[in-house]
Image (tube, rainbow, N blue to C red):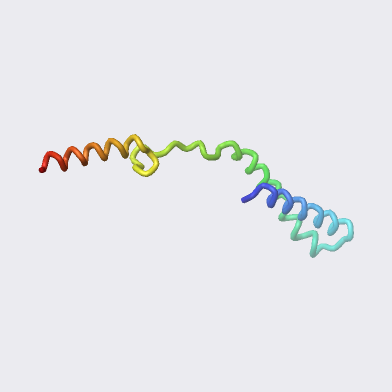
């Protein structure tokens, strides 16, 4: 989920919660009392895991992502076809 969507969702629920509490409108406040901590939790989780993106190495057996293995496999198959002829 994009960061700015999470941030502004949290800020919106916070503002509506404050408005609902100050105006004693419990229908508005009750929904946002639940969503404000959840939005904060979402932002905390985002900051914990934000630096762990795209550091995954390609799998050794994934031929499409690992060119070295692909070249080795081509050599093996070429040698096998040459031996059969």
Q: Quadrant of residue 33?
A: bottom right
Q: Is residue 51 above or below residue 31?
A: above
Q: Nearer the viewer, residue 60 or 24?
A: 60
Residue 51 locus on image (x, y percent): 59, 36
Left or right, 30 with respect to 75, comes to right
Residue that protrudes farthest toward the bottom in the picture: 27
* Residue at x 39%, y 41% (from the top left corner): 65
Numbered disc total: 0
Q: Residue at x 24, y 37 (%)?
A: 75
Image quadrant where one finds the C terminus: top left
Residue at image position (12%, 39%) is 83
- In the figure, is residue 13 to the left or right of 63? right
Q: Is residue 62 visible?
A: yes
In x, y percent, where is residue 15?
81, 54
Q: Is residue 47 left or right of residue 52?
A: right
Residue that protrudes farthest toward the left in the picture: 85
Asked whether residue 38 appears in the rendered view, the answer is no
Foreground residue, 57 or 69? 69
Kindly indicate the quadrant of the structure image that contains residue 18.
Answer: bottom right
The spot of residue 27 in percent (x, y) is 79, 65
Residue 66 spot, x, y in % from top left: 37, 38
Residue at 47% from the left image edge and 38% from the top image edge = 56
| Residue 70 sits above or below residue 12 on the image | above
């Amino acid at each position: 989920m994009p960061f700015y969507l999470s941030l502004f969702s949290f800020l919106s629920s916070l503002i509506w919660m404050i408005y609902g509490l100050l105006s004693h409108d419990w229908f508005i406040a009750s929904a946002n009392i639940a969503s404000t901590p959840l939005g904060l939790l979402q932002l905390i989780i985002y900051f914990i895991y934000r630096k762990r993106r795209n550091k995954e190495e390609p799998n050794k057996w994934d031929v499409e992502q690992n060119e070295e293995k692909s070249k080795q496999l081509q050599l093996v198959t070429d040698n096998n076809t040459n031996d059969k002829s």
